[in-house]
Amino acid sequence: SQQGEEDPQALSIQEGENATMNCSYKTSINNLQWYRQNSGRGLVHLILIRSNEREKHSGRLRVTLDTSKKSSSLLITASRAADTASYFCATAGGSYIPTFGRGTSLIVHP
Amino acid sequence: DTAVSQTPKYLVTQMGNDKSIKCEQNLGHDTMYWYKQDSKKFLKIMFSYNNKELIINETVPNRFSPKSPDKAHLNLHINSLELGDSAVYFCASSQDRLARGANEQFFGPGTRLTVL
């Protein structure tokens, strides 16, 4: 299955610390995306990284992709209480249909 | 100004009933989607429409019938509801088809369906 699998399932940190979440997948991909979901809300797109890219940044977010290891990581630097949410990776292969994992639940304590 | 809106937000109904969920996007996008998020938080695509044409149908029971009256609306009708249909259903849209590289999807707030 192409389904991405996030790790850890849950992460609890203090405000100001960095948060790192990982996503592993099994088959080759065209792109990988990270989304955030606040409790009771829809998903919000964060970053898309294509298979020929290794790293992308957006504000306090940094995403890396290692296609040889079939893994990606999402780093949130200087976390804030407002970053508390679930974070999902979605992988897309030849059909470009995104397949989502179960997400990492991040809690940032003020 | 809500970009992708869904109604209702909550839906509680008995097994065997027929229900509909409506979705509208005001982003001018050509492509819309329905996703199902189960109790374990797995999010799975169900359907996708591009300019009112069905382009993705991911082996969903035929009790589920999407309808797109125009490219800004994609409704989901479910017949003969079953307990296993309980989930959160998300509508989403993107500028173009996924295969054309317009992969950023904008999600609605979700409809929590509970079948008793």
Image: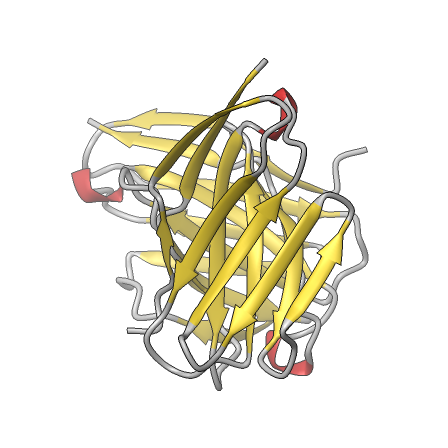
Indicate the colouring scheme.
secondary structure
Q: Quadrant of residue B38?
A: top left
Q: Quadrant of the N terminus of chain A?
A: bottom left
Give B112 or B100, whichever is nearer the viewer.
B100
Residue B94 seen by the camera: yes
How far from the left and from the top, in percent, is residue A2?
35, 73
Query: In the displayed structure, would residue B102 be above or below residue B86?
Result: below
Give B26 or B52, whichever is nearer the viewer.
B26
How far from the left and from the top, in percent, is residue A37?
53, 38
How far from the left and from the top, in percent, is residue B48?
53, 67
Query: In the displayed structure, would residue B30 be above or below residue A61?
Result: below
Give A85 or A53, whichever is nearer the viewer.
A53
Q: Quadrant of residue A81?
A: top right
Q: Residue at x 35, y 48 (%)?
A: A102
Residue B71 seen by the camera: no
How far from the left and from the top, in percent, is residue B97?
65, 75
Drawn side of residue A60 relative to residue B113, left or right: right
Q: Residue furthest top?
A: A110
Query: In the displayed structure, would residue B37 be above or below residue B44?
Result: above
Q: Residue at x 39, y 49 (%)?
A: B36
Q: Residue at x 26, y 37 (%)?
A: B17
